[in-house]
Image: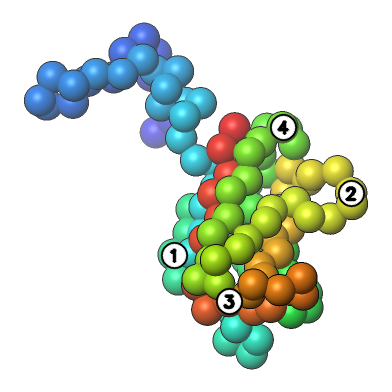
């Protein structure tokens, strides 16, 4: 059964409330926690992420299950090597995927056993 719910405010059982815009625009549109080690790249848990592909040491392509509305999103990344970057390619950010780079205290990309990425729009 499909339908539409229209509301201005969301409220939980304890009486805490927020504007509907906060739920729509303040929620991550995609996120993932994955193992980025060569030979064992695997998604641990995710939302709206269909796959993670290691293209070379420390560089991962993350594909969305459902494309984002546009490419004007914010992508944040963290890893256990202390440094992570998103959208490092020279091309325009894509609505269907994001590129992530991880490094270990050097100027060279390196794999990380724990990588987390979240995209907000």
Res 91 label? 2
**Nearer mark to the viewer, of 2 and 1:** 2
As helix, strand or loop, the secondary structure at mark 3 comes to loop
- Of pointers 1 and 4, the one earlier in the residue sequence: 1
As helix, strand or loop, the secondary structure at mark 4 comes to loop
Question: How are the residues colored?
Answer: rainbow
Dot 2 and dot 1 residues touching (CB under 8 Å) = no
Q: In terms of depth relative to the viewer, which is nearer, 19 or 109?
A: 109
Identify the residue position indicated by label 4 in the image.
72
Identify the residue position indicated by label 1 in the image.
45
User: Would you call the spot at circle 2 few (<14 residues within 10 Å), some (14-19), or many (20 or more)?
Assistant: few
Mark 4–mark 3 distance (CA, rounded to whole Å) = 27 Å
Q: Number of numbered discs present? A: 4
Mark 1–mark 4 distance (CA, rounded to whole Å) = 24 Å
What is the x, y in percent for residue 30?
55, 48
- Of pointers 3 and 2, the one earlier in the residue sequence: 2
- Of pointers 2 and 1, the one earlier in the residue sequence: 1
**Nearer mark to the viewer, of 1 and 4:** 4
Identify the residue position indicated by label 3 in the image.
112
The answer to whether 19 is drawn above or below residue 50 in the figure is above
Q: Is residue 61 left or right of residue 77?
A: right
Please tell me in which quadrant of the rendered image residue 111 appears. bottom right
User: Would you call the spot at circle 3 few (<14 residues within 10 Å), some (14-19), or many (20 or more)?
Assistant: many
- Of pointers 4 and 2, the one earlier in the residue sequence: 4
As helix, strand or loop, the secondary structure at mark 2 comes to loop
User: Would you call the spot at circle 4 few (<14 residues within 10 Å), some (14-19), or many (20 or more)?
Assistant: few
- Of pointers 4 and 3, the one earlier in the residue sequence: 4
**Nearer mark to the viewer, of 3 and 1:** 3
Mark 4–mark 2 distance (CA, rounded to whole Å) = 14 Å
What is the x, y in percent for residue 109?
74, 73
């Amino acid at each position: 059964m499909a339908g539409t719910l229209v509301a201005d405010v969301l409220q939980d059982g304890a009486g805490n409330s927020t504007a509907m815009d906060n739920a729509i625009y303040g929620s991550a549109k995609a996120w993932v926690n994955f193992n980025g080690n060569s030979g064992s790249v695997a998604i641990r848990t995710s939302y709206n992420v269909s796959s993670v592909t290691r293209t070379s040491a420390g560089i991962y392509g993350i594909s969305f299950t459902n494309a984002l509305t546009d490419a004007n999103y914010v992508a944040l990344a963290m890893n256990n090597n202390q440094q992570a970057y998103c959208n490092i390619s020279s091309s325009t950010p894509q609505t269907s995927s994001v590129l992530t780079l991880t490094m270990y205290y050097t100027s060279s990309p390196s794999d990380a056993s724990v990588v987390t990425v979240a995209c907000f729009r």
